């Protein structure tokens, strides 16, 4: 697929990207993936670690994720049963008199918060930051994550920059006024704080929102109110034209009525998906302006872009 000329920056910023949920890798199946313009396959090795390899068998080009299986932690090609370990090394080739020196590219992975993360750097540099464990992974205190996956014809930067657009909150998210955002960059991490105001028939509802961005691919948005709710947003390039937004929603269990967390989770998920579909119609057709005509109160976008530029260094 041809590159999308609406965006002049590189398509794949450096960083960690969430490419699967931990539960998707059950130790028996090979899972095909397509991200960052590459065909990939994920599985669990003999030690139960999540692994991500390039997808094509070096023997005759079969896709290891479509029909491939996992046996004793080894990835088995569906075509000629060649086997590969977690490092991508060929460990068995039926009928071969000598083991071929074949290898499939292996990518750096991590597993945090029930998410399989894939590290991308065009020069192959080692990870320069880590994704921490989030308290929302504690099922005793928080409802199980509810997931949705959306695809947009846009650059992955757009999915993060949107969160720094003060004015759109008044129109897309029905807050009645532009958001006031406090943006604090800290290396590959950035913290944002804002007040969310909703007009309701019973009055004005105010919530404190605190977000943390970890590179271009992972963001955690926490909303504090009657009950605390959280959305983990995973933004990942698919190819030269499309990006994926995978959202994991949860809510904190009230002390005396923990079942209410499921109701709160359902409500925030429904509202978010409705807003994101509206935004998606805009993202699918807009283009990046290097010098947007910003108003005086729209001060966060330039700060965000300066911070985000680090993920394009060397490209």
Image (cartoon, rainbow, N blue to C red):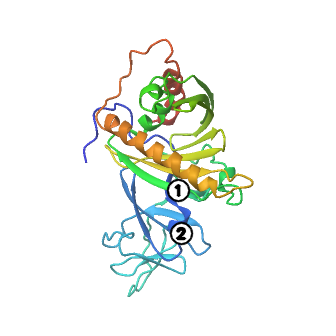
Residue at 53% across / 64% down in the picture?
51
Please tell me whether mark 2 sits on a helix, a strand or a loop.
Answer: loop
Q: Looking at the rendering, which quadrant does residue 59 occupy?
A: bottom left
Look at the image and tell me whether residue 239 can be seen: yes
The residue labelled by disc 1 is 146
Which one is in front in this view, the residue at disc 2 or the one at disc 1? 1
55 and 205: which is toward the camera: 205
**Cα gap from disc 2 to disc 1, whole angstroms:** 30 Å
Q: Residue furthest top?
A: 296
Asked if the residues shown at circle 2 and circle 1 are in contact, with their CB atoms under 8 angstroms apart, the answer is no
Neighbor class of circle 1 (other Cα within 10 Å; few <14, some 14-19, many 20+) is some
Residue at 49% across / 70% down in the picture?
89
Q: Residue furthest left?
A: 2
- x and y, in percent, of residue 279 in the image: 38, 36
Q: Looking at the rendering, which quadrant does residue 78 occupy?
A: bottom left
- Residue 150 as seen in the image, left or right of residue 284: right
- Residue 100 as seen in the image, left or right of residue 27: left
Please tell me whether mark 1 sits on a helix, a strand or a loop.
Answer: strand
Q: Looking at the rendering, which quadrant does residue 68 occupy?
A: bottom left
The residue labelled by disc 2 is 86
- x and y, in percent, of residue 90 in the image: 46, 74
């Amino acid at each position: 697929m041809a590159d999308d000329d609406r965006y002049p920056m590189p398509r794949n910023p450096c960083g960690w990207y969430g490419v699967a949920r931990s539960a998707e890798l059950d130790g028996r199946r090979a899972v095909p993936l397509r991200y960052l313009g590459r065909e990939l396959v994920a599985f669990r090795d003999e030690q139960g670690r999540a692994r991500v390899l390039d997808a094509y068998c070096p023997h005759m080009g079969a896709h290891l994720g479509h029909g491939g299986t996992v046996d004793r932690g080894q990835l088995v090609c569906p075509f000629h049963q060649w086997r590969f370990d977690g490092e991508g090394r060929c460990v068995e080739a039926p009928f071969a008199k000598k083991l071929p020196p074949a290898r499939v590219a292996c990518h750096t992975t991590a597993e945090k918060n029930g998410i399989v993360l894939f590290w991308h750097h065009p020069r192959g540099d080692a990870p320069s930051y880590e994704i921490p464990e989030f308290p929302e992974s504690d099922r005793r205190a928080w409802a199980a994550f509810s997931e949705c996956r959306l695809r947009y014809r846009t650059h992955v930067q757009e999915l993060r920059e949107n969160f720094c657009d003060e004015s759109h909150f008044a129109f897309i998210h029905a807050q009645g006024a532009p958001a006031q955002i406090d943006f604090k960059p800290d290396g590959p991490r950035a913290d944002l704080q804002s007040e969310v105001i909703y007009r309701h028939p019973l009055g004005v509802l105010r919530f404190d929102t605190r977000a943390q961005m970890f590179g271009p691919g992972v963001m955690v948005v926490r909303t504090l109110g009657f009950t605390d709710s959280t959305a983990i947003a995973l933004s990942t390039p698919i190819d030269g034209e499309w990006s994926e937004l995978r959202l994991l929603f949860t809510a904190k269990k009230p002390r005396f009525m923990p079942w209410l967390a499921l109701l709160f989770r359902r409500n925030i998920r429904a509202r978010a998906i409705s807003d994101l579909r509206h935004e998606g119609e805009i993202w699918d057709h807009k283009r990046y302006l290097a010098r947007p005509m910003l108003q005086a109160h729209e001060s966060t976008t330039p700060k965000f872009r300066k911070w985000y530029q680090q993920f394009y260094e060397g490209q």
